[in-house]
Amino acid sequence: MPELPEVEALREYLDEHLTGRVVERVLPLAVSVLKTYDPPLTALEGQPAGATARYGKFLALPVGELHLVTHLARAGWLRWQDTLPAQPPRPGKGPLALRVSLVAGGGFDLTEAGTQKRLAVYVVHDPREVPGIARLGPDPLAEGFDRDAFAALLAGERRQIKGVLRDQSVIAGIGNAYSDEILHAAKVSPFKLAASFTQEQLTELYEAVRSTLGEAVGRAHGVAAGRLKAEKKSGLRVHGRAGEPCPVCGDTVRSVSFADSSLEYCPTCQTGGKPLADRRLSRLLK
């Protein structure tokens, strides 16, 4: 799933390639992709694009007086093309969900792999009309997001820290991969209760949030949209690396599965050398 660093890189890429261009046509190709119908997609045609904004994992593209908002979900992606195929795409064929073509050529496709179609597109007057944006917590890289603000979010929170970090209504933009990376950097068990942190541990976790996300944004800066997935994977130290040696201590990175996903952690760095039991994970994301 694209998370804050990748979505921020896509925002930068669109700013460079799209700002000031005029939308020629917006063509939905998957039945499930469009979540709003008024205003219609046709209201975007003939309008200039402005500077793209990011809200957590959402991208909001101003087009005229409206906004084209998208959430790429778990398997979605944005693919830029300097030259679009002359033949219009056929609905329902392959991963293509929506195409935006521009006057004078080029544009981008929104694609989604797999069978779980969760990619979402909205046309709204204000991005905050999108329910997912309206409920977002603070952005962890915002200037005003300091250590005290972070501590206030965790105060009295009885859930496990892995689930809290992934809760978009608490903190915007962190998903499964970067929550693993943050907890590894902070040397914290994903099962630790958020309310049980000492003041020193809160400081260490806050610093891990800022440094992990900040470094990932830095690595993604200037990377073409088509290479962002590979860049993300290459920068991860524990997520998706079960069975490999921890880059810090050399212990074997372990995995715990839940639903259709998993978390990865280092026992030596994070859990005092003790493996975590799968049966405890059912409480993580409630």
Image: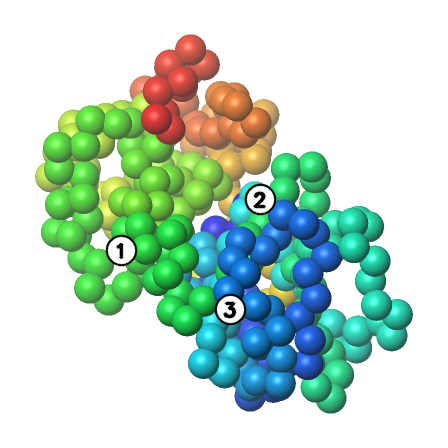
Within 10 Å of the Cα at label 2, are there few (<14), some (14-19), or many (20+) other Cα atoms? some
The image quarter in which residue 129 lies: bottom left
Give the Cα separation between the discs numbered 3 and 2. 21 Å
Return the x and y of residue 172 as percentages of the image width and height.
34, 51
Q: Is residue 11 above or below residue 91?
A: below
Element marked by disc 3 = loop
Q: Earlier in the sequence, mark 1 or mark 2?
A: 2
Element marked by disc 1 = loop
The image quarter in which residue 90 lies: bottom right
Within 10 Å of the Cα at label 3, are there few (<14), some (14-19), or many (20+) other Cα atoms? few
Task: Kindly identify the amino acid type of the residue bearing the numbered disc 3.
Answer: Pro
Please give the name of the residue rendered at 41% of the width and 71% of the height, measured from the top-left corner: 125
Residue at the disc numbered 3: 39
Judge whether residue 87 can be spotted in this image. yes
Within 10 Å of the Cα at label 1, are there few (<14), some (14-19), or many (20+) other Cα atoms? many
Return the x and y of residue 143 as percentages of the image width and height.
24, 66
